[in-house]
Amino acid sequence: MLEGLSDPEQPNNEKLFALLMQSPDLMALYDAEDRLQAANPAYCAAYHCDPAQHLFWRDIMRANYLNRRGPLIETDDIDAWLTDACARRATLPYRSFEAELHNGKWIWITETISADGWMLFHASDISTLRASSRHLRKERDTALRESWTDVLTGVPNRRYVMTRLEYWFEAQRLQPEFGKHSLAVVDLDHFKALNDRFGHDFGDAVLTSFCRDAVSSIRPLDLFGRIGGEEFIFLMPNCPLQAARDRLNLLQQMIRHPGHSGEPSGTTYTFSAGLVLVRHDKDIHDTIRRADRLMYRSKEEGRARVLAEDHKTKA
């Protein structure tokens, strides 16, 4: 944390800490669960938050939106906006982009992600730079984001997911230790029957609700997206199979609660999932095929379950 730099045994760290706290640039540190752990006064003033409260990023953004302060969020549906934003938030080890604040300032943001999922946020005021072409850059960024977003659910679409998976896999292969990373293919059960019984509007509502629940359950380091119909992918870096299975089972319990997503009385839905470890000697397409075969086997064995690849189940 930033506070750790003030160790009196390290005078250079103390000076660095003091300068970071005085800087007009915005600095913040989020942990692997996306809770704010440290921030300098400039960040706290712009985002109206207190690092001592250790709030989730999504809660900070929701409070700013509702109070019309902090970052300018142009949406009529904050839940949908947060689903989209959280689904992409830390899927790259580094990214940079522009953002506007309610006070009219523009800031240039960089986010750097460590291997264990912690995020360093840094932003500088660029209000006076190239203001005349700002609207063109904003239109460009909006068009790019829309091309990577599933229109119905607001989560990353197949194009975005596959691009990020290939990028992530190649980056991981260069690491000295590959680590234990899990990938799951998830498919909603009896979805056609739900559509036939209650109509396509209800089916769309189920898909949207499932995506919001899924995004609320993932870490910033994870990747989640819709790859077609009622089928989804979860990539869970630094997460062994048993931990990944536990997380998917918790999501299953969440969505099985009657009336959870506004369904007609007594109506619930479930999913089947195939779960595998990512292997350094196989490409990401082989990994998806293995998970896909396990997902179909889980349906054959009764649905509403997570079937993981191990010495007893070799897909």
Image (cartoon, rainbow, N blue to C red):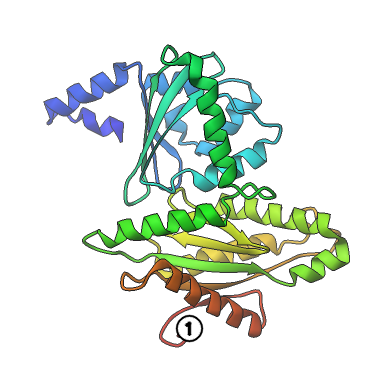
Q: Answer whether residue 149 is visible to the viewer in this image.
A: yes
Q: Quadrant of residue 38?
A: top left
Measured as percent of width and height from the top left, residue 191 is found at 75, 68
Side of 43 relative to 171 (left or right): right
Label 1 neighbourhood size at 10 Å, few (<14), some (14-19), many (20+)?
Answer: some
Side of 161 relative to 3 (left or right): right
Return the residue found at the far bottom: 312
Measured as percent of width and height from the top left, residue 9 is found at 12, 31
The residue that mark 1 highlights is 315
Q: Secondary structure at mark 1?
A: loop
Q: Amino acid at mark 1?
A: Ala
Above or below: residue 28 compared with residue 283:
above
Measured as percent of width and height from the top left, residue 137 is found at 50, 27
Above or below: residue 27 compared with residue 167:
above
Write the residue at 63% across / 28% down.
Answer: 74
Q: Quadrant of residue 146?
A: top right
Write the residue at 68% across / 63% down.
Answer: 229
Q: Quadrant of residue 30?
A: top left
Q: Nearer the viewer, residue 71 or 12?
A: 71
Image quarter (top left, top right, bottom left or bottom right) of the N terminus = top left
Side of 26 relative to 207 (left or right): left
Return the residue found at the far top: 128
Q: Answer whether residue 60 is visible to the viewer in this image.
A: no
Total residue callouts = 1
Write the residue at 74% across / 57% down.
Answer: 206
Measured as percent of width and height from the top left, residue 93 is found at 36, 46
